[in-house]
Image (cartoon, coloured by chain):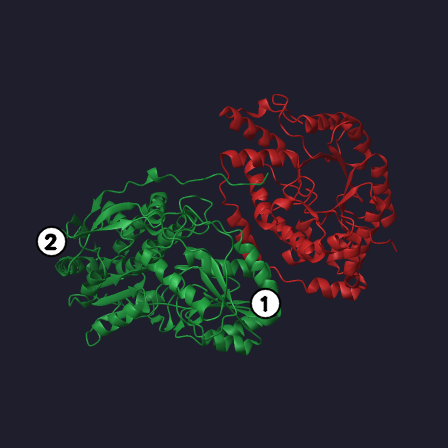
Chain colours: A red, B green
Amino acid sequence: MPTTVPAHGNDAAGRLTELADVTASDSALRRFLHGLPGVDAVGLEARAASLGTRSIKTTAKAYAIDLAISMIDLTTLEGADTPGKVRALAAKAVNPDPTDRTTPRTAAVCVYPDMVATAKAALTGTDVKVASVATAFPAGRAALPVKLADTRDAIAAGADEIDMVIDRGAFLAGRYMDVFEEIRAVKTECGDKARLKVIFETGELSTYDNIRRASWIGMLAGADFIKTSTGKVAVNATPSNTLLMLEAVRDFRALTGVQIGVKPAGGIRTTKDAIKFLVLVNETVGEDWLDNHWFRFGASSLLNDLLMQRQKLSTGRYSGPDYVTVD
Amino acid sequence: MSFTYAPALESRSVVDIASSYGLFIDGEFTEATGGKVFKTVSPSSEEVLSEVAHGSAEDVDRAVKAARKAFEKWSALPGAERAKYLFRIARIIQERSRELAVLETLDNGKPIKETRDADLPLVAAHFFYYAGWADKLDHAGYGANPRPLGVAGQVIPWNFPLLMLAWKIAPALATGNTVVLKPAETTPLSALFFADICRQAGLPKGVVNIVTGDGTTGAALVAHEGVNKVAFTGSTAVGKAIARTVAGSDKKLTLELGGKGANIVFDDAPIDQAVEGIVQGIFFNQGQVCCAGSRLLVQESIQDELLDSLKRRLSTLRLGDPLDKNTDIGAINSAEQLARITELADSGEAEGAERWAPACELPENGYWFAPTLFTNVTQAHRIAREEIFGPVLSVLSFRTPGEAVAKANNSQYGLSAGIWTEKGSRMLAVASKLRAGVVWANTFNKFDPTSPFGGFKESGFGREGGRHGLEAYLDV
């Protein structure tokens, strides 16, 4: 059995140990998860929608656009990925708008494990991180040793961050402890070499109660980030499931003092959408999370829309898709 | 650097407020007899918006006579024809909704977010809904060809000026009545804009008459012997006076009065959503809502946890310019109302309850009150019994469902209540024991034209909205 690894901070391990009885047995974990307050779907969605009506203009918009750019995990996860494609993406992450060098860099480039070395080489000397999906992404249907080997490979190739998927089959079958232990095993593999993002694939968990429970399993198991989706299913990040996960990290920090990041991924394509998510962060967990160490967007096409809106703010004119670079 | 929202003001230029307005009688704007006027101000700035005619008893008489004259033809129209006018009015309201939302925010002080997203959509929905009933009255459950009453005298409050107008006028017209409506003294403008919409819709003269003024104007209207039906929404004290006035006459009466709604949170509630519901229950429209959830009854075992969450949430409320699209809490409607809220809140402190409000800067001009909550409140405190009609929440605790029901019902009022629990059986069991006209489950302050609304006990009688709302305007 792997030992508990601290999520963050010097005393994080100690604090999480205080919750050790929660994960002491399958039944204790089940009782804890089912004892979390329920989620009223209508109320949750209404709150997310109401925050979506915030009107973010002028200086606030400029701030939000730059913040959003700096929070992007610029992603390519295609079977057709090539070293050339990954190098192009890395160049874009470092220098998103060739016409304006004041544009912030993205937080990371996110690729499959076999592309990590290429990405790492292209990003050497920059502060842009390399994130790698792992653990038989996106389905996660492989044996644990395979998942751990996948993780090990990515880290060995230089990944700074690992985006793992949980075993949704185990979760939906009620085997919460299996999910917990698998995350812990991957976390141990990451050690202090890589930050761990845990993807729940919220679209497959289907209910908000499940998303809340999965969030707590992830946080208890030592996730550095909890992440909504792979981007490979019909429903990915939504304001509602992200709001719910923000509430979870807020409550977890109140209980343990340990701060955990949140990453909505998939389906966020426009500046307007991204700003709505930043409003959710601002009004749910506040300033402490308004930093790319604690909040990320998993996205690819979002960046170009942010760049076009950024150009519009500085020039007063809309340009067009030919004034930003294709990936 | 923090994420500070830049001002996002809705433009005032979409609404053109004249420097003075007359009474709308028999399809024309006319001066008040004697030429008396009063000013209407914007509560958020104390800026004078316009001068409005002060209707006298003579003006009321003119209006009732115009309505009586119009009644003959209006009530004889086939329902489908009346429906056409109502549909047309509903569509014009939708088309002019931005203008009306800004106007309502200026005259009332409530945030543009609310007038835009709640008031105006509900106003249009109410007219659409009753337009649909106009040609189906035979199937409303009152027998074949139910008859209208005649002239309806309607007096409405200042908290939802245009929405209360819609609640009164839409069912009255759909059933074939004609109306004389007296808007509140502090918020007359949207009713006068509605008069213009009636003209725009080609509504026959005299079917809708608007007589602005103060309490004396309203008193003259409800006492007028040409009025067949009185509908009033407002304070319980005025409601009682109206009931005395119409006693012994054949006027049909509906009263929608005060409330002291209990919002009951059980330990198995969806906590985050309950917190939102509590906020929506008491801080929507600055708490100036008759069905506000002004008493929070929380199960003792989760009280601390819930209050921590609630206080954290209240600290994020944005109070300020009502025309800013990001404002959550606007201005109190009048100096008089602000004084009443202040007096009652002070009594809470004097009687030993513990007062809390988030750090919150109040603008210099205008009438403002910070969102406030009181803990350690008991049933004996004035702030647990009297309607404050402001952004002040009284928090009480309970131990068992039986105690929750007993405390919730222990009020002279009975307009609204809320239940928060994830357990459906508890929801139904508690709801059936609450003596309140509306019981919301896992939500609060949700309105829909299809749903009847009204009170128990001193919260009044009669129902508005839904099929039930037709009955108040039919001779059945």
Residue B261 visible somewhere in the drawing? no
Q: Along the line of sight, which residue is nearer the eye, B281 or B89?
A: B281
Q: Chain of mark 2?
A: B
**In the rendered image of this protein, does residue B216 appear above or below residue B41?**
below
Tell me the quarter of the picture where residue B176 sits.
bottom left
**Residue visible at 55% across and 50% down?**
A48
For numbered disc 2, what is the local secondary structure?
helix
Q: Residues within 10 Å of mark 1 (few under 14, many from 20)?
A: some
Residue bearing the label numbered 2: B34
Residue at position x 18%, y 60% in the image: B71
Mark 1 falls on what kind of element? helix
How many C-alpha atoms fall within 10 Å of the one at disc 2: few (<14), some, or many (≥20)? few
Q: Amino acid at mark 2?
A: Gly
Along the viewing direction, whichever of A39 and B170 lies nearer the viewer: A39
Residue marked by disc 1 = B303
Q: Is residue B392 above or below residue A277?
A: below
